Image (cartoon, rainbow, N blue to C red):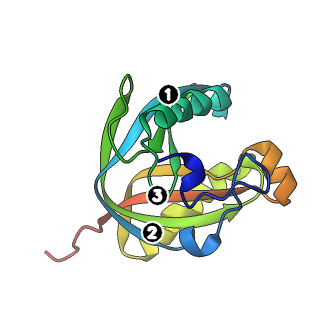
Amino acid sequence: MKLAETNYDNSETHCCARLDPAVWDDKVFEWRDKPFLKDHMRAFLHIPLNFGSVISRDHAAIEEAAAYPEQPLWLTEEVSPWGSDVYVAVDREVPGTTTVRLSGRFVTKLFEGPYRDLGRWTTEMYRHVEAMGHRVEKAYFFYATCPKCAKHFGKNQVVVFAQIEPAASTAA
């Protein structure tokens, strides 16, 4: 299955698709062994240095393996100020790459604005999840558009995926 045959309509920019908030904002996703190609990108103080080349390399491998899922998705996990792990959804193993499987319950929230607001968005997401009676186990970020496409659309959108666990019981 090629990217053009998925639900990813990038015909407007021929790069990033317009994000549909109804699909991503304030949702809960339950994943059991959802496959992702795992890669790594370099960063300087959390600013990605080679995101474009990493995604291009990953998409080429996925395209060659015809491993695109019905709903394309890429997530990043900030592992240090110097780099992030990148997870690109696939529908099967991709030869020559590392495949990991994510399982759990994920709450999402859509944010708009400049990337420098990432810290504020993360804080808001943690508060949102805590208000639901859960705690965040891990946070992942879906940078839905590249800077060029964000400029075209007139907004930069990022979906925060919070992997949650139920809050600990307060009963003695």
Q: Secondary structure at mark 2?
A: helix
Q: Residue at x 59, y 34 (%)?
A: 55
Q: Residue at x 53, y 56 (%)?
A: 6
Measured in 3D between alpha carbons, the distance from the residue under mark 3 to the one under mark 2, in whole angstroms, is: 28 Å
Q: Residue at x 61, y 31 (%)?
A: 56
Q: Is residue 54 left or right of residue 168?
A: right
Q: Residue at x 45, y 75 (%)?
A: 131
Residue 96: percent from left, percent from top: 38, 22
Place residue 135 in its image quadrant. bottom left
Sequence-earlier tag: 3 or 2: 3
Sequence-earlier tag: 1 or 2: 1
Residue 62: percent from left, percent from top: 47, 36
- Identify which amino acid the numbered label 3 is placed on: Glu
Question: Which residue position is annotated with label 3?
Answer: 70
Residue 40, label in figure: 1
Measured in 3D between alpha carbons, the distance from the residue under mark 1 to the one under mark 3, in whole angstroms, is: 23 Å
Question: Which residue position is annotated with label 2?
Answer: 129
Given residues 50 and 43, the one toward you in this image is: 50
Measured in 3D between alpha carbons, the distance from the residue under mark 1 to the one under mark 2, in whole angstroms, is: 27 Å
Residue 154: percent from left, percent from top: 86, 59
Residue 104, label in figure: none
Given residues 117 and 23, the one toward you in this image is: 23
Residue 79 shows up from this direction: no
Q: Is residue 70 left or right of residue 101?
A: right
